[in-house]
Image (cartoon, helix red, strand yellow):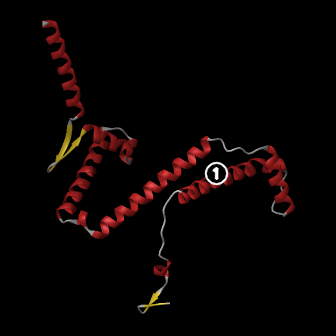
């Protein structure tokens, strides 16, 4: 039984020390603490991180402190609750989420292996040649035509996905509100 308690104590000590190491604080700016982990992550992603030297880390830390001080001052002044600021955040969030969703869907489409056969490439080459849009050989145009056909198919898959979103959604539109309002009168 005594061994059990010693083993448990050693485990708690080891885990306690490792969690303390993760929470090591490099700097405190007023009531905000910058942990070593946070600092290292931000440092690596910054321009300062190109050179992993003590001097570059000190410069980055100074820059980080300045940023935090400015942000704290802005919060004290209530700028983080400003209507225009919140609208900017909302737009940024929407654009970022839209980009992530579209990128994910594009990767899914690419992962499904958009099929473009040599026959399809040859047919597209012949069409472009007939329309006088190219003057190069089939071999010279092969890769470009294949890439364009793949992109066209991926775009079609995205459009089909968006159409399916429309079909599965409940959308109501008040077209009367779209009419222009010049001088307070509806046209």
Q: Quadrant of the N terminus?
A: top left
Give the answer, above or below, for where 17 lies relative to 115: above
Image coords of residue 31 (percent x, y): 14, 49
Q: Residue furthest left?
A: 2
Q: Is residue 181 left or right of residue 54?
A: right
Q: Residue at x 18, y 21 (%)?
A: 12
Image coords of residue 85 (percent x, y): 30, 66
Q: Element under label 1?
A: helix
Give the answer, above or below, for where 84 lies relative to 137: below
Q: Residue at x 77, y 44 (%)?
A: 117
| Front one among 24 and 164 | 164
Disc 1 residue crowd, few under 14, some 14–19, many 20+, Cα 10 Å: many
Q: Residue at x 82, y 59 (%)?
A: 128
Q: How many marks?
A: 1
Residue labelled with disc 1: 154
Q: Is residue 1 left or right of residue 163?
A: left
Residue 184 occupies which quadrant of the picture? bottom left
Give the answer, above or below, for where 115 lies relative to 151: above
Image coords of residue 157 (percent x, y): 63, 52
Q: Is residue 57 left or right of residue 91?
A: left
Q: Residue at x 44, y 59 (%)?
A: 95
């Amino acid at each position: 039984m005594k061994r059990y308690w010693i083993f448990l104590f050693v485990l708690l000590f080891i885990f306690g020390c490792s969690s303390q190491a993760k929470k090591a604080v490099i700097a405190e700016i007023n009531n905000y603490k910058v942990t070593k982990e946070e600092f290292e992550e931000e440092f690596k992603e910054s321009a300062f991180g190109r050179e992993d030297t003590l001097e570059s880390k000190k410069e980055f830390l100074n820059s980080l402190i300045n940023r935090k001080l400015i942000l704290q001052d802005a919060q004290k002044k209530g700028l983080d609750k400003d209507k225009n600021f919140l609208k900017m955040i909302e737009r940024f969030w929407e654009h970022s989420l839209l980009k992530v969703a579209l990128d994910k869907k594009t990767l899914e489409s690419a992962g499904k292996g958009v099929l473009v056969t040599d026959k399809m490439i040859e047919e597209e080459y012949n069409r472009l040649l007939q329309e006088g849009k190219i003057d190069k050989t089939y071999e010279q145009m092969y890769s470009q035509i294949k890439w364009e056909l793949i992109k066209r198919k991926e775009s079609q898959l995205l459009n089909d996905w968006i159409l399916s979103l429309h079909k599965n959604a409940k959308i109501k539109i008040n077209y009367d509100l779209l009419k222009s309002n010049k001088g307070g009168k509806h046209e």
